[in-house]
């Protein structure tokens, strides 16, 4: 026993063996303690929070979950190193502890703030629809908060490493003009993104058409917008291009409008043309989704190989977002017109060419 006590009291680098073993044991136990605390957090505290009417505790525990392990390592490092005779290295140990603490604190604040904003400002989809929430503006706010907290974390790390943050910021201010010149495109896209968001040009999930590309807005960020085309391709478009060009927001069309031209053969009589218009009107009047009061049907012009009837009609309630119902309505109307024309023996025209041959004497 005396030998063991002497061994534990043996000094290495200014510290007894027992002090070093204590510090090592604290670090070795850190993963086990973190695992136990995460188990309590996930299986007891979060379940308890789910039962409460207040959502704040849910956000708090969800934010703690990923950073809990880093907090435990920082705490066990502090407990272990406090038993050491740090001597001239006390500043090094303090800096190491600060670094271990900065990362989980910044990570926790980023996750907590963004989750709180998402819940209290956004809510669920039904709440956003009722409140007419500008989701893109809230996403922008969340991105700015993330960036701001991340920059603060970097400045704290730099300060902790012994650098003069004030002098560094002064130097950045002097070089700000050079940076702005070098990052013109980035800044242009950044401010264009802010303009698109607050102008409410389009929002996440809306259907748009842009320079021949049609699809659904999947994500709107500060630098670029992601557009998922109908064939599944994901396009990443710089915001400056969207701000400088015409973007058609199909979702905001109040109701579907359909235009089509029907060409009848030149053998069609004027009486048959009138009959054709009546049959088209009949089909439109009988369809439940067509607004019969907003239809226009007229004999437009004499085409190269057909007598053209232009037909315009609107849906009662369907918008461009109702893709399945919209296409079904158009198909029903087209089939109905075909059936009525077949019964009346009216013929659709197709490209034809008449060649006259003259016999020379």
Image (spheres, rainbow, N blue to C red):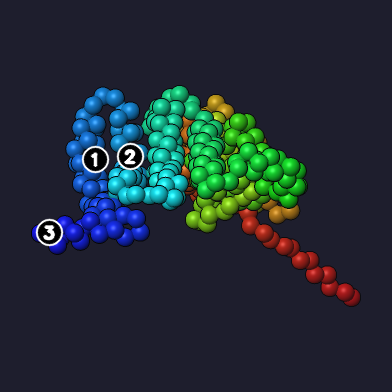
At 51% from the left edge and 41% from the top edge, which residue is drawn? 156
Label 2 environment density (alpha carbons within 10 Å; few <14, some 14–19, many ≥20): many
> Which residue is the extreme one toward the bottom?
361
Q: Which mark is residue 2?
A: 3
- In the rendered image, is residue 203 in sight? no
Labelled pair 3, 2 in contact (Cβ < 8 Å): no
Labelled pair 1, 2 in contact (Cβ < 8 Å): yes
Decide which of 293, 174 is in the foreground and name it.
Answer: 174
At 43% from the left edge and 24% from the top edge, which residue is drawn? 130
Decide which of 31, 184 is in the foreground and name it.
Answer: 31
Query: Does dot 2 land on a helix, a strand or a loop?
Result: helix
Residue underneath mark 2: 64
Query: Does dot 1 land on a helix, a strand or a loop?
Result: helix
Label 3 environment density (alpha carbons within 10 Å; few <14, some 14–19, many ≥20): few
- In the rendered image, is residue 198 in sight? yes
Residue 342, given in percent of the width and then of the height, sits at 50, 49
The quadrant in which the C terminus is found is bottom right
Residue underneath mark 1: 41
At 45% from the left edge and 46% from the top edge, which residue is drawn? 91
Residue 230, given in percent of the width and then of the height, sits at 51, 52
């Amino acid at each position: 026993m005396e030998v063991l006590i002497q061994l534990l009291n043996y000094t290495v680098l200014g510290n007894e063996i027992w002090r070093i073993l204590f510090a090592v044991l604290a670090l070795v136990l850190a993963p086990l303690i973190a695992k136990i605390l995460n188990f309590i957090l996930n299986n007891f505290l979060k379940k308890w929070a789910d039962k409460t009417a207040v959502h704040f505790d849910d956000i708090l525990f969800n934010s703690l979950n990923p950073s809990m392990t880093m907090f435990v390592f920082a705490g066990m490092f502090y407990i272990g190193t406090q038993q050491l005779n740090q001597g001239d290295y006390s500043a090094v140990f303090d800096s190491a502890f600060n670094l271990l603490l900065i990362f989980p604190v910044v990570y926790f604040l980023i996750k907590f703030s963004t989750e709180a904003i998402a819940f209290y400002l956004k809510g669920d989809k039904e709440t956003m629809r009722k409140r007419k929430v500008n989701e893109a503006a809230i996403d922008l706010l969340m991105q700015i908060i993330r960036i701001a907290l991340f920059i603060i974390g970097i400045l704290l790390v730099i300060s902790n490493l012994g650098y003069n943050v004030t002098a560094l910021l002064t130097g950045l201010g002097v070089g700000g003009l050079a940076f702005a010149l070098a990052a013109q495109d980035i800044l242009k896209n950044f401010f264009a993104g802010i303009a698109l968001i607050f102008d409410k040009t389009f929002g996440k999930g809306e259907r748009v058409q842009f320079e021949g590309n049609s699809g659904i807005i999947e994500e709107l960020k500060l630098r670029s917008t992601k557009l998922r085309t109908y064939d599944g391709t994901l396009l990443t478009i710089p915001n400056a291009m969207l701000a400088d060009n015409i973007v058609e927001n199909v979702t905001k069309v109040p109701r579907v409008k359909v235009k089509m031209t029907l060409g009848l053969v030149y053998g069609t009589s004027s009486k048959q043309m009138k009959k054709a218009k009546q049959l088209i009107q009949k089909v439109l009047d009988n369809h439940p989704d067509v607004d019969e009061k907003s239809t226009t049907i007229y004999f437009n012009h004499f085409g190269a190989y057909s007598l053209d009837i232009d037909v315009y009609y609107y849906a009662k309630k369907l918008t461009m977002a109702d893709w399945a119902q919209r296409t079904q309505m158009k198909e029903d109307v087209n089939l109905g017109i075909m059936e009525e024309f077949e019964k009346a023996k009216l013929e659709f025209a197709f490209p034809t060419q008449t060649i006259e041959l003259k016999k020379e004497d």
